Image (tube, helix red, strand yellow):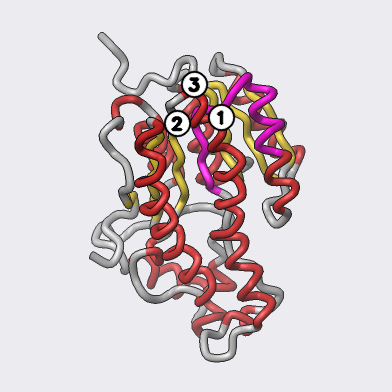
Amino acid sequence: MRQLIDLHGRRALVTGGGRGIGRSMVLALADAGAEVAVASRSQGELDAVAKEIEERGPRGFAVIIDVMSCEQITAGVDEAARKLGGLDILINNAGGVIAENPLHLDPLNHDPRAFEDNLFLNLTQAFYATHAALPYMIKQKWGRIISIGSGYAKNGGGPLAYSAAKHGIIGFTRSLAYAAAPHGINVNVLCPGWTNTRMVDWNMLGAMTGVSAAEAKRLAESQNIQKRIVEPDELGAMAALLASDAASAVTGQVISVDGGFMI
């Protein structure tokens, strides 16, 4: 029987792919047959994930990229394309929250530098990666760009700069989808809810809201209708589907894998 999600012959780059949701998406792409370049700042994590890719059959490559540097992003995308022999799929997964002190994220007294840094990490760097990847996709008349949003990309709440950036990812995606469609390129946003990764620091989240870590987690679980924290592998399967020809009619969309977050 023909495999629904078939990525054999496709070449992908996943930023922030060394752990968590990024790693799950990398391995889901590899399981569907794609060759994958995985990018982050940590050589050890990247080498481990690249080995996991090759254990599944396709080629895997590690590419060091600090996504807070526009120069490194551009160079890293080009390096990934050289190693892969081209580029068909880009997943802008890198992101998170930068804060030396949780109080710096107070919406009513937000630290200006932290605001700028969080906007860059969660929005601007996705532009630079996409800008570098588009020429490869335009030339071959086929491409998939998936950016990772958030439950707070569609709702209020969350750290101010983080939420502003994730809302921006949706606008960025919808605008680009119009321009990219004539070139055979689909552009979508995949939004996780609360997900079981190291990026979710219950202690920091509790400190930001004045509750314990345990209470912060309980409150997060209460925000979706399944009353649970999502697992990273649940995002991986959806990313592989969106990257495949099975989702050829899906573009400009915001797709959530979040247990029914704030619906």
Q: Which sits earlier in the primary sequence, circle 3 or circle 2?
A: 3
Q: Is disc 2 placed on a helix, strand or loop?
A: strand
Q: Is residue 172 magenta?
A: no
Image x and y of residue 81, in percent: 64, 27
C-alpha distance separating marks 3 and 1? 13 Å
Query: Measuring 41% from the left and 38% from the top, which residue is drawn there?
Result: 239
Between circles 3 and 2, the one closer to the viewer is 2
Q: Which sits earlier in the primary sequence, circle 2 or circle 1?
A: 1
Residue 10, numbered circle:
3
Q: Is residue 110 visible?
A: yes
Quadrant location, the N terminus:
top left
Query: In this rendering, is residue 70 above or below 11?
Result: below
Query: Measuring 75% from the left and 38% from the top, which residue is drawn there?
Result: 44
Query: Measuring 48% from the left and 53% from the top, which residue is drawn there?
Result: 196
Q: Which residues are magenta?
A: 76-93
The residue singled out by tag 1 in the image is 136
Residue 143, numbered circle:
2
State which quadrant residue 22 falls in.
top right
C-alpha distance separating marks 2 and 1? 8 Å
Q: Is residue 237 visible?
A: no
Mark 3 belongs to which amino acid?
Arg
State which quadrant residue 243 falls in.
top left
Query: Measuring 46% from the left and 51% from the top, which residue is drawn there?
Result: 148
| Cβ atoms under marks 2 and 1 closer than 8 Å | yes
Query: In this rendering, would 37 be left or right of 249?
Result: right
Q: Is disc 3 placed on a helix, strand or loop?
A: loop
Residue furthest to the top in view is: 1
Mark 2 belongs to which amino acid?
Gly
Query: In this rendering, would 24 be left or right of 157?
Result: right
